[in-house]
Structure formats: structure tokens, C-alpha cells
Image: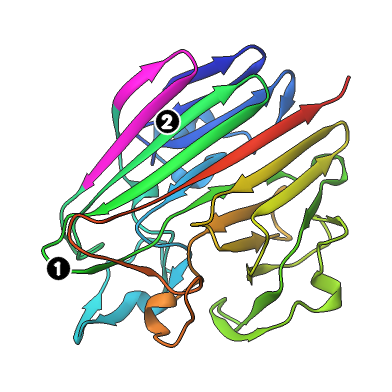
Amino acid sequence: MLTLRAGANAIVVAPETGAGVVGWMAGGTAMLRRAVPGAVVAGDPHVMGWFPLVPYCNRIAQGRFTWRGRQYRLAPNFGDRPHTIHGIGWQRPWTVESVAADRATLTLAHAADDSWPFAFDAAIGYVVTADAVVATLSLTNRAPDAAPAGIGLHPYIPKDNNAALRFNADGVWINTPDVLPLRHTPVPPEWRFATPLEAAPMRLDNCFTGWDRSADVRAGAASMRIEASETFTNLQVFTPDWGDFFCAEPVSHVPDALNRPDLPPGQAMHVLAPGESLAGTIRFIVTVQG
């Protein structure tokens, strides 16, 4: 594992476990869910503080889709759940291409297989400064033909100290009981995060569209701002009642986008020509008082 540090701000990256971040300490404050060391060693990405999402985000219904007239079925990747989820990068070892005291670059080369039928190269770069962690994620199509692509980041933020979330969005997907998008609507009053809403009482696993690519988390004396580049047009918000965390995930498309050909740009997956890339940057800026 790699420790990247700038002053009292430090993250630990696990290349062998999806290039995920095991934890992030800003001074003495944990900004992400603390990982279970034994589970990290065993390669369990479910215990990470965050991990990159490539080559798609969230769920693909029943792990099936049709692309350019051909039907595909993906290998299950989430236990006995029927839908595949989060892409494949979170479950693969990545290669460390470069590392310094405050930064690192990791890569993943994927050959077409039953988990994803299109070859690609992915990279994530981490940079730590005194008051921020910056993640830059990219995906390049290495298939011989055009291929769908999506990227995102999946952070797990502690609910401690009455953590509250703030962001602006103009729409949201209402889900089916098995957490697939059902219909797109304006954001209902009870889900309007323009005024910070405490995460613990919420019960969401919904994709917000048209957000302003800026979100704030406030938890006691600590606060964190999430700033995403224009690639990340949607924010998936997950607030489980069974966990001590919530998630605010900048993503490039909505769940199950491959099975929804009528989605508008910004909600649909990108289509990359051979050799074409999709990239974006997410900056997490932290303030800890006292």
C-alpha cells in the first residue's frame, strides 16, 4: 500500500484492491470510512474509503445489454445480486506507474472478457496537498470498434457528528424496488439539498442530474467540498440505514444507461472511438477547525 502525504493531510492507497483509498486522515480527523485492515489484505473492495468506477457506474440490469445490435451478458460481480455493479476496476489489481511523497499514478489494462467485452486502459492519479486530495481518472478505448464508457468515484463518508450534505440539482431518478431508474422527475422538496440535509435520516440510492458539480459535507468541526469537472454530470447519493456511512458519487452517466437508448447527453454513457479517451478530475477540499 502507498501512503501519500502533504503535511498533516494523508491518504493510503491500495493498488491491489481496485486502486482504492483505504483511508484519509486530515490531521486527526477521518474524512472517509475506515477500512478493515484484514479485509483490505484479502482484496475486499467493499471495505475501502473510496474506489474508482470504470468502465461504467452503478448498475446494469441483470448484467445484460445490447450494443450495436449484439447482445451481451456480463459475469456476476456482486454476490448473488442479479445486477452487475460499479464496473470492473474496483475488483482488479492496478499497476503503480509512478509514486512520490505526495502523488501517485496507477493504471489498469483490460482485455475483453466476460466481465466487460471491450478492451480499455484506465488510469487514476492521486495528488495530496495540505488541504485537498485530487483524483484524476481516465479511460481509453482499446477495442477495435466504438465502445461505451463511463467513469466515476465512489467515496464512503462517515455519518459521524450529524454529517450533512449540500448540493444543487435540477432532477432525480426515482427507482424501482430493485434500485433501477424508473422515471426522471424534478427534485421533490424533501430531497432538495440546496439547504444542507443530515445524511443519517435519509434513505436514498438515487441519481441526481443537472447538479452544479459542487457538493459540501459538514460534520462537526470538519467540512469537505467536492468539486468535479464537467465530465461528471450526475451525482449518485446513497444513504443506507444499515451503514455508518453515506456516499456522494460524481459519475458520468446514470445507472443502467446502456439499457436506456433514449437518455439525453449527460445522462447517457459516452461512446468512444478506438483510441479515444474519457477523463475527469474530482477535487476534495478539506477544512478542519481546532
Q: Which stretch appears magenta?
A: 97-109
Q: Residue at x 26, y 52 (%)?
A: 140
Q: Secondary structure at mark 2?
A: strand
Disc assigned to residue 69: none
Q: Residue at x 31, y 79 (%)?
A: 64
Residue 122 visible to an observer of this rendering: yes
Residue 156 visible to an observer of this rendering: no
Identify residue for label 1: 145
Confirm whether the magenta stretch covers residue 284. Answer: no
In percent of width and height, residue 186 lies at 73, 81
187 to the left or right of 85? right
Q: Residue at x 38, y 41 (%)?
A: 18
**Image vertical order of residue 36 relative to residue 162, above or below:** above
Identify residue for label 2: 14
Magenta stretch: dominant secondary structure: strand
Q: Residue at x 88, y 59 (%)?
A: 195
Q: Which quarter of the figure is the N terminus placed in?
A: top left
Q: Nearer the viewer, residue 116 or 276?
A: 276
